[in-house]
Image (cartoon, rainbow, N blue to C red):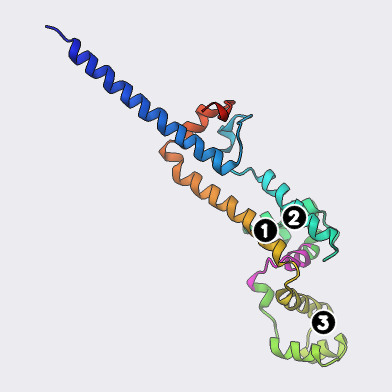
Amino acid sequence: MNCAPQTRWWNKGQRDTDMAEDTRKQQLLELFTTITNKKTIVEPMRKVHGTLRDRDAVEREIALIVREILDQGYFKTKLTPRQLAKLVVAYYDGKNDTEIARALGDEKLSKTVARARVRLKLFRDLDFKMPFDRELMVKLLESGKIMKEISEELDVSPSTLREYRHVIEQQDDTTLDPYLERIRDVMEDRDLSEHMTRGVINDGLSEAIDVAEAIDMGEF
């Protein structure tokens, strides 16, 4: 019995399958390149299958934006640009001020963290839970009275009053908005990257990343 036609058919079918798989891998690799903005993979990617944007790279990008803000003199803080970048990322990860300060190496920095966070308009609901009427506070601040008189009338300490005044002032201040928009873009890119990774990793991207290890993407 002559099986050559069937063999040729099977070989052709296998070649078609292989070509389709190669095409699929190439598309996944191109997607990976687009998301990560990298032309060459220079380290094993098994370490980062859960994220396409390295945390350190995100922090560096944010630090550059924050450095511009500080260089312009828009606000002063004892935190470095890299620490402020870590603050931003940690805030988006759901960390509270004490946890962020601890991550920066000193839990005593929690108040410094809180003020810098508010200056960067990274507000929390708690920032606006004032033990007095907000409109009354604003009216008193505009009345020309000194902080001690206002704090006594609102029955809070002067330091507490200053914290809430800081929140209101930063909420209304638009000076940093262009910079903060760029920071939000960086974080949204990170979130999108992670979301896309989770969405496609079970559909072959994990395999494609493995295949791409130490491969120059420009060869495809």
Mark 2 or 1, nearer chain start: 2
Q: Residue 88: where, in percent of width, then height?
A: 69, 57
Dot label at residue 65: 2
**Residue for point 56% across, 52% down:** 191
Q: Amino acid at mark 1?
A: Arg
What kind of secondary structure does the magenta stretch mostly adopt? helix
Tell me the CA gap for discs 3 and 2: 35 Å
- Closer mark to the observer between disc 3 and disc 1: 1
Q: Residue 106: where, in percent of width, then height?
A: 80, 54
For label 1, count other residues whose C-alpha is less than 10 Å away and answer few (under 14), some (14-19) or many (20+): some
- Closer mark to the observer between disc 3 and disc 2: 2
**Residue for point 56% across, 32% down:** 46
Magenta stretch bounds: 113-125
Residue 168: name its quadrant. bottom right
Mark 1 lies on residue: 182
Q: Amino acid at mark 2?
A: Ile
**Residue for point 42% across, 40% down:** 202
Label 3 secondary element: loop
Query: Given contact means CB atoms under 8 Å apart, are the residues at marks 2 and 1 in contact?
Result: yes
For label 3, count other residues whose C-alpha is less than 10 Å away and answer few (under 14), some (14-19) or many (20+): few
Mark 3 or 2, nearer chain start: 2
Q: Give the total number of marks visible in the rendering.
A: 3
> In this rendering, would 53 be left or right of 84?
left
Tell me the CA gap for discs 3 and 1: 36 Å
Mark 3 lies on residue: 157
Residue that extends furthest to the top in the rendered view of this protein: 1
Q: Residue 195: where, in percent of width, then height?
A: 50, 50
Label 2 secondary element: helix
